[in-house]
Image (tube, grey):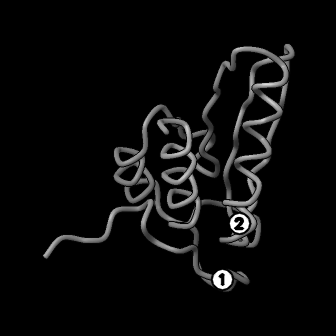
């Protein structure tokens, strides 16, 4: 019996008091999400070039309810009118948790739909 895919999991509440993922675990989980990069060992980032400004804003609006449902919120940076950079970190840990990769996988599903 395999482990449930990241996109099917639910983020777990995180109030701190636990250690962030070690680099080896983050690297392993990074293989399960497409196009994300590890930044400073504390953040994962993906940049998406949308068709135009309205498409980029629409993507933000589609990401928002998914993030809200898991109570895990990305930093979203819209630049050059159609380039959206999505950054995930677990603020309570000042580093990465499995939650970041779960939300990344859900965003990937949204992008491939």
Label 2 sits on a secondary structure element that is loop
Place residue 56 in its image quadrant: top right
The spot of residue 32 in percent (x, y) is 36, 48
The mark found on residue 104 in the picture is none
Q: Residue at the spot x=72%, y=32% of the render?
A: 85
Look at the image and tell me in which quarter the N terminus lies.
bottom left
- Mark 1 and 2 residues: CB-CB less than 8 Å, in contact? no
The spot of residue 83 in percent (x, y) is 75, 20
Q: Residue at the spot x=78%, y=36% of the render?
A: 58
The spot of residue 110 in percent (x, y) is 55, 44
Image check: 13 left or right of 92?
A: left
Q: Residue at the spot x=64%, y=48% of the render?
A: 43
Question: Is residue 84 placed above or below 34 in the rendered structure?
Answer: above
Which residue position is annotated with label 2?
A: 72
Place residue 7 in its image quadrant: bottom left
Q: Residue at the spot x=47%, y=36% of the render?
A: 112
Bin the neighbour count of mark 2 within 10 Å (Cα to Cα): few under 14, some 14-19, many 20 and up. many
Question: Is residue 99 placed above or below 16 in the rendered structure?
Answer: above
Compare residues 97 and 22 and report the one nearer the observer.
97
Image check: 17 left or right of 82?
A: left
Image check: 66 left or right of 1?
A: right
Q: Residue furthest left?
A: 1
The mark found on residue 13 in the picture is 1
Label 1 sits on a secondary structure element that is loop
Place residue 73 in its image quadrant: bottom right
């Amino acid at each position: 019996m395999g482990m449930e895919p990241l996109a099917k999991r639910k983020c777990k509440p995180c109030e701190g008091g636990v250690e962030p993922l070690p680099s080896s675990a983050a690297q392993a989980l990074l293989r399960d999400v497409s196009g994300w990069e590890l930044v400073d060992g504390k953040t994962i980032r993906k940049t998406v070039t949308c068709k135009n400004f309205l498409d980029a804003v629409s993507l933000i609006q589609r990401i928002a309810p998914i993030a809200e449902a898991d109570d895990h919120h990305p930093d979203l940076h819209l630049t050059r009118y159609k380039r959206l950079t999505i950054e995930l970190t677990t603020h309570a840990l000042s580093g990465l948790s499995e939650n970041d990769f779960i939300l990344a996988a859900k965003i990937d599903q949204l992008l491939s739909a």
